[in-house]
Amino acid sequence: MEYRFVCSGKTYRVNIVADKEESWQVAIGDGKPLRVELITSSSGCYSFLMDGEPITAYAVEGGGKVYIFVAGQSFAFELEKGRARGTSGREVARGSGNLVASPMPGSLVKLLVSRGDEVEEGQTLAIVEAMKMENELRSPIKGVVRRVNFAEGNQVDALQPIIELEAL
């Protein structure tokens, strides 16, 4: 089945073909298909192999969107008439802005930045412990920390903005 989504203003085609039970061939655009095999799933947490590489992803639904968190990055997808249309991972908990949020409820165990700090895209900004796993929250952009909404040791909810950034 073919889906289309938009990320950072660019439209992508994604073809997903069931290979066998809990296994798929996934191709983005004209790219080589990747084999995706589900290992386990529980309460929005998915562990799978992508061409043999282990990956863990979290998915949360809210406000008509599905939010996916994987490898410290976040993506928001708006489902529309059987097709997926996504938005930039920077638009996690609100319609706009550059926010860094937790993929699931947990404890903010480490805060690595303060208000006014300059950060690089991909830089680890905070660590949230959830379900006995530590999740690194990374910056989706190069920017400046405009606001830190929590302190180390605080409990955070899924999709609650922990850090707000301003692009440089």
Image (spheres, rainbow, N blue to C red):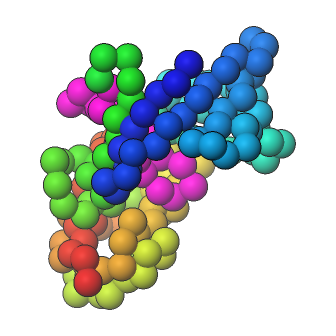
* Residue nearer the viewer, 150 or 119: 119
Check the picture and name the quadrant holding the N terminus. Answer: top right
Residue 113 vertical position relative to residue 134 in the rendered view, above or below: below
Q: Which residues are magenta?
A: 62-79
- Direction from residue 118 to residue 146 in the image, left or right: left
**Residue in the picture at 39% in, 66% down:** 140
- Direction from residue 12 to residue 31 in the image, left or right: right
Q: Is residue 41 visible?
A: yes
Considering the whole magenta stretch, tell me its main secondary structure.
Answer: strand
Residue 99 vertical position relative to residue 114 in the rendered view, above or below: above
**Looking at this rendering, what residue extends furthest in the right direction?**
52
Q: In terms of image quadrants, where is residue 4?
A: top left
Is residue 3 on the magenta stretch? no
**Looking at this rendering, what residue extends furthest in the front direction?**
30
**Residue in the picture at 16% in, 47% down:** 95
* Residue nearer the viewer, 88 or 68: 88
* Number of marks present in the image shown: 0
Q: Is residue 77 visible?
A: no
Percent from the top left, x then y, of residue 20?
78, 13
**Residue in the picture at 61% in, 25% down:** 16
**Residue in the picture at 47% in, 56% down:** 73
Check the picture and name the quadrant holding the C terminus. Answer: bottom left
Percent from the top left, x then y, of residue 110?
45, 69
Percent from the top left, x then y, of residue 49?
76, 38
- Direction from residue 134 to residue 104 in the image, left or right: left
Is residue 73 on the magenta stretch? yes
Residue 159 vertical position relative to residue 112 in the rendered view, above or below: above
- Direction from residue 106 to residue 56 in the image, left or right: right
Q: In terms of image quadrants, where is residue 80?
A: top left
Q: In terms of image quadrants, where is residue 45?
A: top right
* Residue nearer the viewer, 22 or 72: 22
Percent from the top left, x then y, of residue 124?
48, 72
